[in-house]
Image: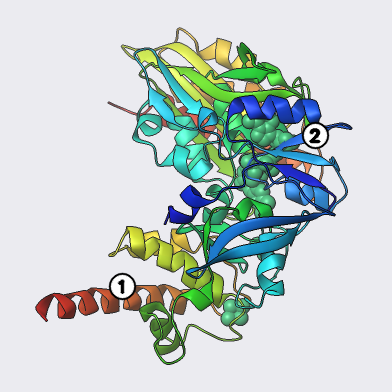
């Protein structure tokens, strides 16, 4: 996780004509990025094609722009793109593919937790961070983890179910792997 | 949004070099959860932002022999999950636990919460009840002041622009503490009223007590008459109810988008009463 941070060289970032050059890894792909001083991580990610990160409120209130920064959920709308220098960013695109979805993605579909889908990338990413730390969360722990992610469509119940379902899937997968 | 340059110094000395080089003013950037929103509204439009969030001098939670020290760039999430904070600073741990939302808690720092000086800042309210001293550096020269003395009014502090809060220090003392907030929802809501209480009891007698109320005045409110009333007593329900009334008399709330002055005043009484009961009537 910290590999990029250690190797990132530029420390004092000074803009040339308002453009910074930063190094960051997005979904495992390391590279140099050119970002504006006023760009948030949200606008920079979307401008570079990572459209899975959603702009809801743009003021920290809804959670739809949540990404993982070195594995921890943060709000991309309040984070400057330059602050991603040396960091490893994960968006929903980094989790699975349509052919091989992540257990959380499978579980959200199976539980019927998705309606319009706008809040789902953020919900899945906070759930990923939760399950990475705590593979068998209680319902209360799941609810607390999802506290910052608003959904205008569903009643939240199915999303809580989906996270529990995913926890089971991940556990079974690990048991199967251990048995192989 | 108009930051033109963001400087990320590697060491504290780099902060002062960057500050000297910044012509026309600068701002420290920690989690950005207040600063970015303000800049988007054209407030605090400084041309240079000095990013202090990665400096190790502002990090770490340590338990010394007679002090607990929390780096100013520690996040609310780190503070509420720290065993030392939970053990020695219960009101602060609870304030950080009920703060904003989980992703915001991973970003928002204690230093930023204080320096922003919102009267409804939860961590700042608990810091005052927990008797925090702020360790401040200006161009490398360090001073310690009571964190409470930093707050002058809404979004107004005694900090000069080049004052950097390095850490908060707390006496290491076994005590009881609680933080209760009332918002529109149980979680992810800015306080309409909050109360932080820290107390030491000896044989049931209150030998130290600090009560602080948030979001009910231009700055965090200390209802001294309520503290005085309970000090030296073995308080029962009646004394606590009296103290809670004094708390409500000490506040000067306003009507705003979140609530009305009248509701806030009444809730200041209710929340103070609950907080005092939780701390002073708890057996064990
Ligand atoms: C949707 C939302 C909900 C919120 N809910 C709550 C809530 O429930 N309770 C609550 O208390 N707050 C809440 N907040 C506000 C909270 O996130 C901020 O007050 C936060 O703690 C500020 O810290 P930061 O690290 O993000 O500061 P920044 O935004 O980086 O900085 C804020 C100010 O502090 C200065 N500063 C930062 N660090 C230092 C330092 N070490 N020394 C000197 N100056 C410094 C900066 O220059 C700036 O002026 C909420 C915010 C949002 C967006
Ligand atoms: S878009 Fe970031 S929290 Fe809503
Ligand atoms: S599914 Fe539509 S916002 Fe959540």
What kind of element bears circle 1?
helix
Task: Report ligand 3 position as a quadrant.
Answer: bottom right
Mark 2 Cα shell of 10 Å, populated few (<14), some (14-19), many (≥20)? many
Percent across and percent down for residue B138 are 69, 18
Q: Decide if residue A154 is in sight here.
A: yes
What kind of element bears circle 2?
strand
Q: Is residue B232 left or right of residue B43?
A: left
Q: Residue at x 41, y 31 (%)?
A: B85
Chain under numbered label 2: B
Residue farthest along the left direction in this orientation:
A179
Mark 2 near ligand 1 (CB under 8 Å)?
no
Q: Is residue B29 above or below residue B146?
A: below
Q: Nearer the viewer, residue B110 or A91?
A: A91
Q: Decide if residue B191 is in sight here.
A: no
Q: Residue at x 53, y 18 (%)?
A: B131
Residue at mark 2? B26
Mark 1 Cα shell of 10 Å, populated few (<14), some (14-19), many (≥20)? many
Residue farthest along the bottom direction in this orientation:
A99
Residue at mark 1? A167
Percent across and percent down for residue B83 are 34, 35
């Amino acid at each position: 996780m910290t590999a990029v941070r250690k190797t990132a060289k530029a420390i004092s970032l000074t803009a040339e004509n308002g453009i910074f050059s930063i190094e960051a890894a997005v979904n495992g792909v390391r590279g140099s990025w050119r970002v504006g001083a006023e760009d948030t991580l949200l606008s920079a990610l979307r401008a570079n094609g990572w459209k899975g990160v959603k702009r809801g409120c743009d003021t920290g209130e809804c959670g739809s722009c949540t990404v993982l920064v070195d594995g921890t959920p943060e709000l991309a709308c309040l984070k400057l793109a330059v602050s991603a220098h040396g960091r490893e960013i994960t968006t929903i695109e980094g989790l699975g593919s349509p052919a091989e979805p992540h257990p959380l993605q499978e579980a959200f579909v199976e539980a019927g937790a998705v309606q319009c889908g706008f809040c789902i990338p953020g919900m899945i990413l906070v759930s990923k961070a939760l399950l990475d730390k705590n593979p068998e969360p209680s319902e209360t722990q799941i609810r607390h983890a999802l506290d910052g992610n608003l959904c205008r469509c569903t009643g939240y119940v199915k999303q809580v179910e989906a996270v529990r379902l995913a926890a089971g899937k991940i556990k079974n997968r690990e048991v199967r792997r251990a048995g192989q | 949004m108009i930051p033109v340059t963001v400087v990320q110094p590697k060491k504290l000395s780099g902060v002062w070099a960057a500050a000297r080089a910044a012509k026309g003013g600068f701002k420290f950037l920690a989690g950005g959860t207040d600063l970015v929103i303000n800049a988007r509204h054209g407030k605090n439009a400084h041309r240079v932002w000095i990013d202090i969030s990665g400096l190790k001098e502002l990090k770490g939670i340590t338990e010394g022999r007679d002090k607990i020290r929390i780096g100013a760039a520690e996040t609310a999430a780190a503070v509420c999950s720290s065993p030392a904070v939970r053990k020695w600073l219960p009101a602060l741990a609870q304030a950080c636990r009920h703060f904003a939302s989980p992703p915001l808690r991973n970003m928002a720092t204690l230093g930023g919460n204080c320096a922003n000086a919102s009267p409804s800042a939860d961590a700042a309210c608990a810091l005052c009840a927990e008797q925090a001293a702020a360790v401040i550096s200006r161009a490398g020269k360090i001073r310690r002041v009571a964190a409470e003395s930093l707050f002058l009014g809404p979004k107004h502090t005694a900090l000069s622009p080049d004052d950097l809060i390095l850490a908060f220090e707390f006496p290491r003392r076994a005590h009881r503490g609680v933080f209760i907030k009332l918002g529109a929802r149980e979680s992810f809501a800015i306080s309409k009223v909050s109360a932080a209480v820290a107390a030491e009891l000896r044989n049931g007698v209150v030998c130290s007590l600090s009560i602080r109320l948030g979001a009910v005045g231009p700055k965090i409110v200390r209802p001294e008459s309520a503290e005085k009333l309970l000090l030296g007593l073995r308080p029962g329900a009646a004394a606590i109810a009296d103290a809670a009334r004094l708390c409500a008399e000490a506040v000067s709330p306003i009507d705003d988008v979140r609530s009305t002055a009248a509701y806030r005043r009444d809730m200041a009484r209710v929340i103070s009463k609950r907080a005092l009961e939780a701390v002073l009537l708890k057996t064990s």
